[in-house]
Amino acid sequence: MGVAEFLKDTVDSFLGGRGKSSITVPVMDGPLQPNDALEHAAVAIEVPGIDNLIARGDGLLVSSGNRVLRVADGQAKVELEFPSEVMSMAVRGDGVLAVGLDGVGLLLCGADGNQKKVEQIDDIRLTCPTAMTFDAAGALHVCNGSATTGARDWPRDLLEIGRSGAVVRMDPETGSGAVLATGLAYPSGICITGTGDVVVSEAWRHRLVRLSSGAAGEPVPVLEDLPAYPGRIARSSAGGYWLAAFAVRSQLQEFVLREHSYRRQMMAEVSPEYWIAPALSSGHSFMEPLQAGGVIRLGIHKPWAPTRSYGLVVELDGDFVPLASAHSRAGGRHHGVTSLVETDGQLLVTAKGAGRLLTLQTNAFRHSLGKAGRRTAP
Amino acid sequence: MEAVTQLYYRYFPEKVLGEVLTKRWSDNFVPAFAALLVIGVFLVRDPAFFNLASLTETSRQLAEFSIVVVAMGIVLLAGGLDLSVGSVFALANITALICMNLLGWPVWATVCATLAIGALCGAVNGFLIGYLRIRAFLTTLVTLIIIRSIVDIILLHYAVQISAVFPDSELWYFIGEGTVLGFPVSFLVALVIIAAWHVCLTRARFGWHLSAVGGGRRSAYNAGLNVKRTVFLTYVWSGVLAATAGLFFAARLGSAGSDTGVGLEIAALTAAVLGGNSLGGGRGSVMKSILGAIVVLILTDSMVRVGISGGISSAILGGVLLLVVAIDVRWLKNRHKILNKVYVSPSYFRLPEMPETAAGSDSPYALNDRLRSVELIGKGEIEGPEDVIFDRADNLYCPNRHGDIVRFLAPDYRDWEIFAHIGGHPLGMAFDRDDNLNVCVGGMGLYRISPDRRVEKLTDETNRTFLSVIDDSRLKLADDLDIAPDGRIFFSEATIRYDMHDWAYDALESRGNGRLICYDPRDRSTRTILRDLQFPNGVCMAGDGQSFFFAETWGCRINRYWFDGPNKGRCETVVPNLPGYPDNINRASDGNFWVALVGMRSPALDLALRRPGLRKRMATRVARDEWLFPNINTGCVLKFSADGEVLESYWDLGGVNHPMVTSMREHKGHLYLGGLYNDRIGRLKLPDADPEWASQDFYWGRSNGGR
């Protein structure tokens, strides 16, 4: 950092929030205009701790805790069980299943039942595998959210202002690979575009970035200034993408992230479930921090109230421009959306905060939300 | 580090800064500082300036000049501008000289004629501006030129004759050069004029009308003021005062120079605005004008002494005017922003470790679902029943946020009526011996409603704290009360720094801003008995006739205060370190006491209470709806014994049925729950309670006070 920049930041912080000290959060407007579509979505099945949903040829696979379950006909059957919590999954056309285990690394399960463990690519230890996907050539791309904390402790990485995430590419057959990017602020979602580019959700920087094809070079933002923390990305049948946002930003959160000594003391003295931090679900204890707008008045919890947890699904076009969104707002249940899959005109959404698999009709989604929120790309 | 924070916030009166800025007189700080600075510089540079002869001469000049500035200040205050003061000054000078020197009139006639000429000039201005609604700037610019021409014409004809004659009047010379007790006459007269105008502007009807008209013509008109006449009169007074100054000038120098009063209007305007009178009207005072006059006079004098030529000194004066006008505009625009930033002043407060509340633990606070079976009364029909109470006929009374007292009729409490309307937001209630309902009304004070629905104010003010900056004599947030057996009413005022709806700011401060007050109906006196309490809330007599319990909401504790008997004046904490924020306290049928916890503590907020700087920055940078807040969505009811042991608790975990509990009242085997933000009253069956017990009968006896 140059001296001039340092001086500017110092002045900004004293003048009460300009530049980097600004705690402004973009409003949910335009395509992100709030609605209750996600809150009113049909519940397909309830699975406590439901997390990563992927489509396999013979059905849907969903992770929950240490297990991977197969969902069919409204039933969830345990298919695989692991010694550690499953944080992410991906499946290849030939049946190879890649599973990311919290604190351990990757496990590649061949269709023949062989399992292969991969713990490290170059100097990146894959202890926080937040999302992964196979590309057309069959190579696996993995987001490693943080070098210091596991994926279950993601609020800690946010409060520690984690910038230690990485993205790697590996060949499942040989186990060798390459590091595509480092220094990312919690990469938590990944997809391969039609042109073969890798696009990653960088949660703590509230943006999606395109990784340049060479090993060197800065990531290029494709969607910035989101009011939420973006997570996993899925292809849509319309040629665009679905984005799951696992939590929303708040002014108070941005403020606390800039109050370094309070932030550290809170992490040291307060137990994590009561931190001022986003969560996948909230309202379980009165010891959770409450913000003024969240006070119930005359029996009504205002839906605009600032909240620790939120449910948000965003539809993006092929250029990552938001088109429409489905919300579950403050006081709702369907919070903490972690993954989504589109099949047969239906969007299946996992709300980890509620432990539910939800179904949204993509037609209805576009029809009902488009009018309220759709805006043509500039 | 934390110890340093603690010491700083205990001893550094940061909150006073904000309180001072709420005062109108804080506008005077800058001009006062400027005056002291200019005087100080001169004291160092030119000590001769401050010898007696020089000071006497200066004070004569100052007297004349400050009268003109006061005139300018009056016009500015009413939203106008008078550029003709310099010309009127010159005309008054020449008029007085003609009367004395040429016509040989006596002094009293001269004075009358001069002042009349001044009033006439002012009346012309006032008529054109006030009644014909011509712009003040143009009008007075034109009269400036016309009157100046008249003066020049008179001078052309009579200047030589005037200088040739010396009036034969001791009184005339006494006015110009005499002293009383060492003070020049003109200076003393100026003091009298200043004092009179100060009283007029701050205390008298005419002065208030001026401020009102200057602050907003339309509003003043709508309020029924005669705007045109008020504006007219300001110019008349301006003319009279300018003529007074001209009279003193004539008596002092007796010269009919052509440059008399030239540029005086700019100097006076500079002084008035420099002193802090707003150009836009509505804000100004005599003191501001005087401060400005001192600075400008010393400045111009000094420029003469230093040897700066007239042209350049005028330019400097113009520069000063430009500068102060810019400051005036910026200050007016940003004053409330600065105030917003500095008024909220959080303090250091460290709570002990929170007691265990986990369900299943053996703590008396252990979570349970005992409030889940609460029945609801008046759901959706009532807004904000902070307290509930019963009369002897079992009717239920509660306040609402519209300022009414609502009565639900026994026995099923299905029908309700408005018992009385008070206004404000009624909060705590208590019946006295004669079945009058005494009510604390947020924003208003202590009120009493008789059984035949007559509303009577008992008190709305108490003694003002010595040396307090903000006026704390008015009751801003009377909260809860109870009545001693001798009829004295003890009530709490939650905070003196914020109004009813800004109580969240007080939570953010967590300082002792509240107090306990006693109203004695025997001599109708009100006096503060205990100060610096952290949001004192519920008050309940302990039953010994000598003491009562009161809750300190942000302090998370319950105290006992002895108002009589051997322990009189003692205050001790009986229940420290509650897991939440206590609100109202009431008697239970088994001799113990109920207390409502309006909200629960959260660890992140407890930690923030130890960091006042953090909360201050939060208050200024984070939107109010986003603030970290005491969790008042969950509450509970506790029972504690007179010696401070917490016996049991009643919770509603989800807060579905009854989100907030601010008060509870036991009545005939049931517990009734009120909540400030609720739209319902809760009713819970108490299986073990005495089904015949009623608080009113228990405390005051079954008989109806002899009636």
Image (spheres, coloured by chain):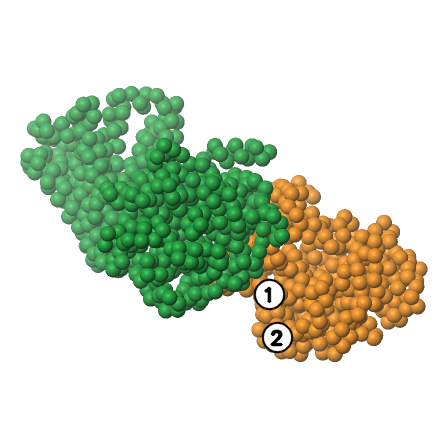
Chain colours: A orange, B green
Identify the mark nearer the N-term, 2 or 1.
1
State which quadrant residue B496 falls in: top left
Q: Amino acid at mark 1?
A: Gly
Q: Residue at x 18, y 33 (%)?
A: B189
Q: Amino acid at mark 2?
A: Gly
Q: Label 1 crowding class (10 Å Cα cut-off): few <14, some 14-19, many 20+?
A: many
- Left or right of B343 in this view: B467: left
Q: Nearer the viewer, residue B564 or B298?
A: B564
Q: Residue at x 80, y 70 (%)?
A: A77
- Residue B40 shows in the view: yes
Rendered position, A25 above or below B331: below
- Left or right of B64 in this view: B372: right
The image quadrant where one finds the C terminus of chain A is bottom right
Residue corresponding to mark 2: A370
Query: SS for tag 2?
Result: helix
Residue A288: percent from left, percent from top: 60, 53
Chain letter belonging to callout 2:
A
Residue B199: percent from left, percent from top: 22, 40
Rendered position, A41 above or below B233: below
Residue corresponding to mark 1: A332
Query: SS for tag 1?
Result: loop
Q: Do the dots labelled 2 and 1 sit on one chain?
A: yes
- Left or right of B4 in this view: A91: right
- Left or right of B542 in this view: A224: right
Q: Residue at x 76, y 48 (%)?
A: A148
Residue B506: percent from left, percent from top: 46, 46
> Label 2 vs label 1: CA separation?
22 Å
Rendered position, B392 above or below B98: below
Chain letter belonging to callout 1:
A
Q: Residue at x 83, y 75 (%)?
A: A58
